[in-house]
Image (cartoon, rainbow, N blue to C red):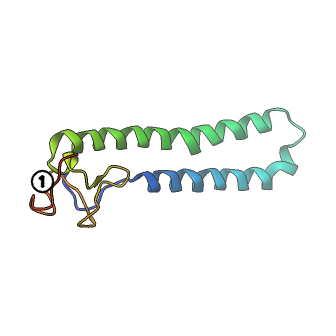
Amino acid sequence: MTGSPQPRATTGSIVAAALMRVAAIGTVAVLLNSTFSSSGWWWTAVLFAFWAIGVYPAWLQYQRFNDTVEELHSGSLCGACRHFNATNQLCQIMDVHVTTEEPPCEGEGWEPR
């Protein structure tokens, strides 16, 4: 973890990006359906594109996100606090994204889980 003030990814940003990619693939598939509908490979290619471009990268990014959250849980004071929200790496009482460098509340608002 770099300790940047904003996390690179949150659960919401991963899901939103995946939905946008799947919607774009679906739109292209519907627009090109009249051209390729007579061939049997068309829908197989579309389903593969949904997986390869839309879902699989989001799954990989979510795995990396979970690794980052586990690093925060084990390597920072905020990870052991009951106010830490793991889905967006946020301190709920301070409304600040958590880093590994220092707690946003300087330890004054820390409460054990």
| x and y, in percent, of residue 97 in the image | 26, 60
Q: Can residue 1 be spotted in the picture? A: no
Residue drawn at the location 72% of the way across and 56% of the way down: 27
Q: Can residue 33 be spotted in the picture? A: yes
Q: Is residue 73 above or below residue 101?
A: above
Q: How many marks?
A: 1
Q: In which quadrant is the C terminus drawn?
A: top left
Query: Which secondary structure, mark 1?
Result: loop
> 10 Å neighbourhood of mark 1: few (<14), some, or many (≥20)?
some
Amino acid type of disc 1?
Answer: Glu
Of residues 16 and 44, the one drawn nearer to the viewer in this rendering:
16
Q: Which residue is mark 1?
A: 101
| x and y, in percent, of residue 59 in the image | 48, 39
Q: Is residue 97 left or right of residue 51?
A: left
Of residues 57 and 69, the one drawn nearer to the viewer in this rendering:
69
Q: Is residue 3 left or right of residue 25?
A: left
Q: Quadrant of residue 105?
A: bottom left
Q: Is residue 38 left or right of residue 61?
A: right
Residue drawn at the location 58% of the way across and 56% of the way down: 20
Q: Is residue 57 above or below residue 109?
A: above
Residue drawn at the location 87% of the way across and 50% of the way down: 34
Of residues 80 and 19, the one drawn nearer to the viewer in this rendering:
80
Q: Is residue 88 left or right of residue 2?
A: right
| x and y, in percent, of residue 104 in the image | 16, 62
| x and y, in percent, of residue 102 in the image | 11, 56
Residue drawn at the location 18% of the way across and 54% of the way down: 3
